[in-house]
Image (cartoon, helix red, strand yellow):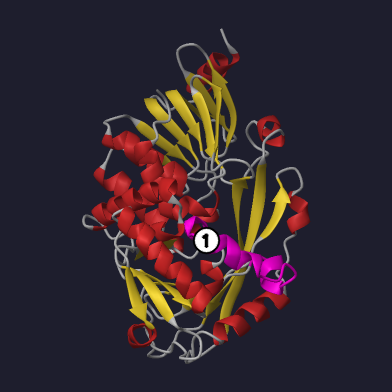
Amino acid sequence: MPACCQDAAYVCGNAMFMKTHYDLIVIGGGVLGTFHAYEALMQGQRVCLIDKNITPQGSSVQNFGQAVPSGFGVKWQRYGRKSLEIYKHIQSKFDITVRNNGSIYLASNEEEMTLLEELAVINRGQDYSSQLLSAEACRNRYPGLRADYCVGGLFFPEEITLEPREAISRIHQYLREQTALDLYNNTLVIGIDSSDSEVWLRSSDGRSFSGERVLICNGYEFQLLFPEIFAQSDIELVKLQMLLLETQPTQRIPGSILTGLTIRRYESFKECPSYAAIKAKEDPEAYARKWGVHILFKQTPEGSIILGDSHEYADVNQPELLGRELREDLNQFMIAEARKIFDLQTWAVRETWFGMYAQCKTRDIFRHYVDDRVLILTGIGGKGMTASAGYAHYEPIFQ
């Protein structure tokens, strides 16, 4: 009898064995794992979603809560646009905090405006709705926008925001109430054994799970399962600093606000004809470039504003290089840059934190089959909140 079967028999003898045999077990309850569970459920499969935390804690709750396919190149924009459809479909049935307020990219000079104009042409070719706005139209739409910053904008009406600290948990609640999802929070999987016919999982509290297939969406946790695989990968960790400003008494700024530094950073603009020449003029020693800063604003329903962010990088084998501290100089720089863009009613900081995500150096996602029944899927980078639902829809995990 294989070791996994012995473990199962032991657990069964202690009345803790999970009797359901699943078509798919997903380890990791973040956005990538959750939407692969969603797709399997839509296909009528028996699905179990397991997360090591009581509530989601990783990249999926540490971000802005912006779903902005406009920031992607053609390949990933397709996934992002499908994600918008899925988010809106779920929202029509159950409140997962989706707000369809659109996204705006604000140009601070003529170079950035040129890139917006070129991207608008690309959007038309891809049949993705966008609208060029004058500086006056931008100021009328976004209260407090400084006239000395904005020369124009590009608006994406289909894009949405979510509240990152609530959305994933609400999607879990929706799946539990309206599908047959079995969700196990606060459950740490410490072992996986495969045979020709099934896979067995063992958790740290003595429970066992069995299924036909296992998908591991481990985010940036690389030490618990198959650490040797990650040690040989091209994955790197990214650390981002963000701030939460206090509630603006009456000022309301709709949707996602992306600015000039974002235009100079996001993938979609790299497809613009003028991008390379414009980037070549930049100072390689500039503080914003050194720390990967671009300024984003997203206001919550109660009026506080999420502001950021910065980017620091470390190899998967050297996470300690990123540290746990928050750099106050980065926070002050981001606030100073943000003050050039908006006149807010208050700049008081309620909270500051860092988020983490994993990305690949040489490919756009880490997809590794341990064997025919176990797949690792992570390293989606900063695309997760926007593109995971569409990626899960279009890219089968087991053929």
Query: Magenta segment: does it hold 272?
Result: yes
Element under disc 1: loop
Point out residue 306 in the picture as x, y percentages from the top left corner.
50, 74
Q: Is residue 181 something one can see in this rendering? A: no
Query: Magenta segment: does it hold 274?
Result: yes
Q: Is residue 75 something one can see in this rendering? A: yes
Amino acid beneath label 1: Tyr
Point out residue 257 in the picture as x, y percentages from the top left corner.
44, 73
Return the residue at label 1.
266
Residue at x-position 56% and y-position 17%: 4
Mark 1: few/some/many CA within 10 Å (<14, 14-19, 20+): some
Residue 99 to residue 150: above or below? above
Residue extent of the magenta highlight? 267-292
Of residue 375 and residue 175, the one placed in the foreground of this image is 375
Residue 353 as seen in the image, left or right of residue 19: right
Residue 207 to residue 78: above or below? above
Residue 251 as seen in the image, left or right of residue 368: left
Quarter containing the C terminus: top left
